[in-house]
Image (tube, helix red, strand yellow):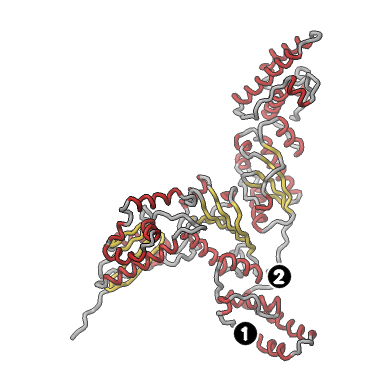
Amino acid sequence: MQKQEISNIIIFFVTQDLKGQPRGLEIHLIPEKEVSMANQRFTEYLHRQREMYKPSLVQSYLPDLDLCRYQFPPGVSYPDIRLFDKDNSQVRKFIAENGGSMQGNVSLRGLEYLYHRDEEKSLPMLVSSGLANHLLVQPEAKRFALAQDTLNDDPSETLTAVETDKGVLLFEYSGFGKTCCHSFMQHLADRFFITGEEKPEFVNLYKLTRPDAEVVKAFQTSPNAFSLYTNSFLPDKAQYLDATILRNARLNKSHRMEPTLDAYDKFASSYGVVPTIANAQILRLLSLQETAGIYGIDYTTRRIPFMHKNSFNSQFSALQNIPAENKGEQEKVKALIRDQAAYILKRDYGISPDNRQNKEIAPIISIQTPKGAVYLPVTDEGVLYKQCFLQDLADRFFTPEVQSLGRIREFYISNPNHSTEHYMQKHLDFFRSNPSDKQLANIPLYPIEQSELLKKGGYPTEPAYHAFKQFTEDNRLSVNSKNAGIFTLLFIREYGLPADFNTNESYKEFTHKGDFKPLEKEMSELQSQKGYSEKTFYHIQNRQQQLADKILGLEYKLTCPPLQLTGEKASEKKKAAPHRNKSHNPRI
């Protein structure tokens, strides 16, 4: 009797968002009539997806996704999954063009609700009966699903960011984001000992709490740079963002990417990455070069055979035959082991003592604000660019952009790390390009290290007389004519008109001089009288202050600190006896 040929059909398991964009994909070949096998595999897929996405204390966001099963008619050829990774939209196109029909659509949040109620044992029955497609029918399940949008870790509230020399990648603060972040770290670990420009010098991990609209938009428009099938990182699809988006981020971890045993061990233990076969060899060789023995190698690495073992057999045998008290002979053999390890590292992996030494980084100046910092070298060129930046801040001191900075501080970094040096080089290139005033006003501000956070000190950027005076004088900055007028108004607002208002040459160009003439005349007439009333004097001076405050608010749109009128009580507190103020002589 002739056996009937078994016909296999293709089934897609797709994790997709509400717009139909895929996040994950599994492809299965199943005998056409084996419905129970298809149900079992889909149930297992649901378990795996829930295990990856399930909320935890670290990642509590549960995205609103659908876990779908598409079945294709017999005769459809197995697709090339590389095309799907290159362009995720090809998944939907393939389903539409090849007659894929949806056989199941399970809500991820509905699935979590099932686990939340400890009813996951009923999942196989629900899948086989088709009821798994209706997990959100119950009102309580609907409320559970809607409640996920109010948790604090959705993308508009919290994101994870990884920064390297190339820029920043953003990750959703969920189980899926954690998986993708781990894949990226594994990608970096696999290339940890590669010498050349491709390998980054540092890796920083940040947590962005309540990111601004710019960061959320950048995250939402970034392409999926991870394989739908394996979640592995796809370098060609990655679009790195500039580090300026990390201005308000909190640094969680920082690692240097130097080809040393210590650097790799710290990176691997921090992110739980596993070594490649090549890295396992390099780690052993590095240990041999540093200690003449193989120490500090984890269990995973030890399971990978040491390919260069035969190159050291004679030395190890000789070492075992030398008595413990014969230190001199032992050191000679250990020196041979170190030299042999160094030779193999250079010959086979291009790693030499020269490229393993920590590069000493020169000190850096940072001009810090609560929104980020500008980094420059401690050289004549760096000082020149620093003055250029500070002068631009002085020229725009009373604009909303500079006022919103809140505070400006210069900080000297004697021992900067690689990321700070990277920022410094970017700012150096920026100034060397001879930026225009508009470009200078939009200079990128990069993150401030946790140990250097701007907590106190520096110069406040509030529209106050002493704030502007100290900033410009301490940094030897010039004051343009517009700011000189505002500066004079701020002085009048705090102290009234200067005593030499009519005689000092510096006030001839004061734009609002005519506005104060009536009050100046009134004051002069009062002071020409013997024994004039102090109450009347302060009344006129207070009107001068109020007029200056009004002009600053209406014409210059400045929100100044609360107005403190002069008077007997104020003068007693400040112990300021003289009635008339000396000139403040703003430098123009």
> Vertically, is 329 above or below 552?
below
Q: Residue furthest bottom?
A: 321
Give the number of the disc on residue 16: none
Residue 338 screen position, x and y as percent: 71, 80
Q: Which mark is residue 309?
A: 1
Where residue 359 sits, quadrant-wise, is bottom right
* Rendered view: 306 above or below 174: below
Quadrant housing the N terminus = bottom left
Q: Do the residues labelled 2 and 1 touch (CB within 8 Å)?
A: no
Q: Which of the two residues, 568 or 106, is positioned nearer the viewer here?
A: 568
Q: Position of residue 530 (x, y in %)?
A: 81, 8
Q: Position of residue 429 (x, y in %)?
A: 65, 51
Q: What residue type is labelled 1?
A: Lys
Task: Look at mark 2 in the image and give the residue it sits on.
Answer: 354
Which element type, helix, strand or loop, lies under badge 1?
helix
Q: Residues within 10 Å of mark 1 (few under 14, many from 20)?
A: few
For the residue pair 390 and 118, the one nearer the viewer reads as: 118
394 vs 44, left or right, is: right
Label 2 vs label 1, nearer the camera: 1
- How packed mark 2 is, by other alpha carbons closer than 10 Å (few <14, some 14-19, many 20 or more), is few
- Left or right: residue 447 versus residue 83 is right
Q: Which of marks 2 and 1 is nearer the N terminus?
A: 1
Q: Is mark 2 on a helix, strand or loop?
A: helix
